[in-house]
Image (cartoon, rainbow, N blue to C red):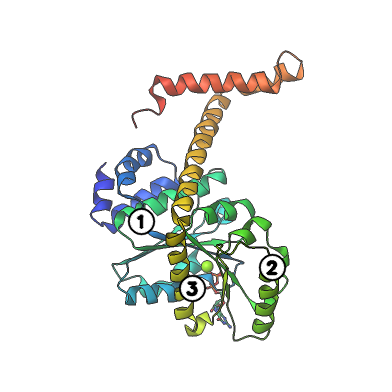
Amino acid sequence: MRLANKVLAGDVQAAARLISQIEDEAPNALEEMKGIYPHTGRAYVVGVTGSPGAGKSTLADNLIGLFRKKNMSVGVIAIDPTSALTGGAILGDRVRMQRHSTDREVFIRSLATRGWVGGLAKATISAIHVMDAMGKDVILVETVGSGQIEIDIVKAADTTLVVLTPAAGDEIQMMKAGILEAVDVFVINKADKEGAEHLKMNLEVMLMMKDRRPDEWQPGIVLTEAIHDKGTEELAEAIFRHREFLVASGELQKRQRERAKLELLETVEGFVKDFIHKIDDGDYLERLVDDMLQGRTNPHRAALEITNRLASDLGQGGKDGF
Ligand SMILES: Nc1nc2c(ncn2[C@@H]2O[C@H](COP(=O)(O)OP(=O)(O)O)[C@@H](O)[C@H]2O)c(=O)[nH]1
Ligand SMILES: [Mg+2]
């Protein structure tokens, strides 16, 4: 656990290396994470989602500046699920936040996984743990809006911001139901452009139509001009207000529980997928499929056979020791 100990001491290079190992799903990362887990649960996680070009990174940059003024240390994880396909990192995000790159209290990492897409949510949660253990007060997670991965990553956040722009008025109609439910604060960025007030009204009407219990959170709407650092204070206030609500209502614990559950399920899924990949190297799977097609077995029985093998494989010390 050499890397983990360095991370706990605030070593940025060690943290960067550990996150790379997490991305690569290196076996060593699992080992190191053992030393990280006991030091997590302190950081406040803010998810920032929205379409490409909405201004997420520019906003994140402004928020970093504001949090730093309040003497809070900040971690940023920038995720682009599409980069998982190309294996590339997201240059633009790093550039946008460049002015903080020399601040020791700011740690920015982009994340992509080369493995299955589900792995990205797990890698994100692990990266959050690393930054949390480093002692970061706030962790911003920037992700491009796109389906299931977005929903999973949003589940990992305490407060979720969705960034809209006046140009994309139809966007709310097109947003996945799962996302809309999860939004805590709507940000209308590029308020310097025409249509911002109109979008705000539409949003207000939409939010009013939703039945809410009186004790439920009423999502905030904040107008910003990220390129001019306008509205940043209001946005930060909306985030802090939501945090206070979560703490007072007991909802924060519920979200942390939800996150732990997601992590558990992703880990189990990871075990199964790794194992299937491993046994697939032979022609074991193909033979099971043959058997299915010829009626010698059925999907249920074949699946049981695989999970039984997985159980005995894990029992033989494959992944134990935790
Ligand atoms: N007009 C205008 N442009 C903005 C504003 N905020 C960001 N931009 C520009 O929008 C582009 C995309 O911004 P970026 O932060 O990279 O968006 P992201 O893809 O959501 O991270 C950049 O060229 C920004 O300068 C704004 O408030 N007004
Ligand atoms: Mg960006």
Whether residue 252 sits left or right of residue 195 in the image: it is: left
Ranked by sequence position, the earlier of labels 2 and 1 is 1
Residue at the (50%, 69%) spot, across then down: 92
Ranked by sequence position, the earlier of labels 3 and 2 is 2
Query: Whole-percent x and y of residue 83?
Result: 55, 56
User: Dot 1: few (<14), some (14–19), or many (≥20) neighbours within 10 Å?
Assistant: many
User: Is label 3 or label 1 in front?
Assistant: 3
Which amino acid type corresponds to the residue marked 2 in the rendered image? Answer: Ile
User: The residue tagged with tag 2: helix, strand or loop?
Assistant: helix
Provide the residue designation for mark 3. Answer: 238
Provide the residue designation for mark 1. Answer: 131
Query: Whole-percent x and y of residue 117?
Result: 57, 46
Circle 2/circle 1 CB separation < 8 Å: no
Query: Whole-percent x and y of residue 217?
Result: 55, 64
Provide the residue designation for mark 2. Answer: 172
Q: With respect to residue 52, does 167 lie above or below? A: below
User: The residue tagged with tag 1: helix, strand or loop?
Assistant: helix
Circle 3/circle 2 CB separation < 8 Å: no
Compute the Cα span from label 3 to label 1: 23 Å
Whether residue 184 sits left or right of residue 36 in the image: it is: right
